[in-house]
Image (cartoon, helix red, strand yellow):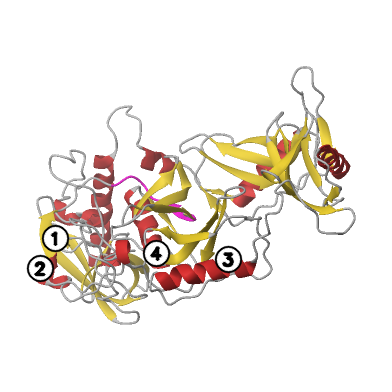
Amino acid sequence: MIARLSALFVALALAGAVRAAEPEGDAAPGLAAQLAQAEVVTGADIAARVVAVLAEAGQLAEPAISAERRFHPCVDDMAVAPRVAGDWRTVVVTCGAPVGWSVTVRTGARAATPEAAPEGATLRQVDAAEIDRAVRDALALVGEAASPVVTQSRTFYPCAVPLEVAPRIAGDWRTVSVSCAEPARWTLNLRTVPDDGRARRTPLGDAPLATAGDIEAVVRKALAEAGIEASPRVSQMRRYYPCSGELSAAPRYGSDWRTVEVRCSDPMEWSIHIRTTAHAAEGAAAGAFDITAADVEAAVVELLDAAGMSGEPVIPATRRFYPCSEPLSAAPRDGSDWSLIDVRCSAPFEWSLLVRANLTSLLPAPVAEATPDAAPDAAPGATPQAAPAAASAAPQGAEVVALRRSLRKGAVLTAEDIVMIPAPQKVSTGLFSSAEDVIGRTLTQTLGEGRALHARHLEHDWLVREGNPVMIVNAIGGFEIITAGKAVGNGQLGDIIEVQNISSGDIIQGVVEAAEKIRPVANMN
């Protein structure tokens, strides 16, 4: 009976807190609220939409997209259009609201359906034979007896104008670029081979080809002069452009010799990036530290969390990144595309990379704290202490633990590293109200000065362990009702975990508040 009464009070308090957070009148909901109201789009939804649109265009489609992929919600009908006008084999699926996003999908359509071409032009389907003729004609004009290497079974995008052919690198016809300008620009790079089977001269004159041995020698020399004990990773199968001048080698960024840029300036300029076995940056990058896949992943997760979203960015643990002496920054690509996150470093040199967010859920807008002034519609008898939904956030006016200065991943926190700051206005789980809770623990990611510490920033410190007994504490009015439970999983301070009520056998969710103590965030039956 007591348990059911406590459940009733909890439900009423939750209802009051949620009503207090709703916008007044007809005010438009925020982005997070809009996202929460819409359903996540899956790969299966996109495939079904593509099949339907192509069917209207008289095309049979088998979209090449995983049914398990997840995308941002979409409250409008997704638009489907060919990536290149008239060719339905590749389409772009676009959604405009509440967050603009798009994805390119191969359809498996059997053939292109020509659409209206530019005035005065005829849209035609380009095939391997036309590519072959265009390249041969261009080679003949410069006196080259050579043929393009074109796969006869390949198909290409439509084109409404004559194809353009040019050497990919000025003067060297061993690789050519075939391009079309209308109705949409596309380019194809092809190798060419001499018709007589002999090595041919090019307009580059007597410039010798650069070999793998040349590249390796210049990199080894540069590493030795810099006092770096390392070796270049050069493929012996690679072919390089001719160079009649002297090759040069220098670190691609600052003085980080893990990637070296090899350059040639005569008879034409070209460069190539070579990985080495160097392990750490020196010189200008002194004081910087290696960035790991975990650091990049943490930056993405932190950004999504602040925007009311969650995701599972997948970054291979074996990937290597350039060093960074500042905390990483992250932002959605183009400001609205949350499927790709741009992660950047600004010092000791600038670099960036794009990471797929792999969204797993979109959370509702933050719930305002229930206070007498902010919740006029709260249920009778509900008090701030009776609102477990807000119990995971620090009370208004409270202080939480933050960093006094920027620290790198792996740092062990001391009293000198800690400062108390006012609790954030929005509701957030996992904050610490006492410095003793974090002193001696290790950071799992690099954090900047003034950043409030969350449980996820520190190595695991389980306050509740799977299978152990826990106290389920419900606050009703000025009283606390304690029920015995058993943890279904592990939990740190502020984590939301599942707990089994021993008396009823029901599984509920609760916020970890202390050792072997949780406070429910869902109804107990």
Q: Earlier in the sequence, mark 2 or mark 1?
A: 1
Magenta-tinted stretch: 358-366
Residue at point 85%, 59% (across, down) = 198
Q: In the figure, residue 6 lies in which quadrant? A: bottom left
Quadrant containing the N terminus is: bottom left
- Quick check: 63 above or below 83? below
Q: Give whichever of 92, 400 is nearer the camera.
A: 92
Tag 2–tag 1 contact (CB < 8 Å): yes
Q: Earlier in the sequence, mark 3 or mark 1?
A: 3
Left or right, 230 with respect to 86, comes to left
Left or right, 58 with respect to 448, comes to right
What residue is shown with label 1?
Answer: 404
Amino acid type at circle 4 is Asp
C-alpha distance separating marks 2 and 1: 8 Å
Residue at point 20%, 43% (across, down) = 378
What residue is shown with label 3?
Answer: 215
Residue that lies at the very extreme toward the bottom in this rendered image: 468
What residue is shown with label 4?
Answer: 256
Residue 190 in the image, given as x and y percentages of width and height: 75, 49
Q: Residues within 10 Å of mark 1 (few under 14, many from 20)?
A: some
Residue at point 62%, 70% (across, down) = 213
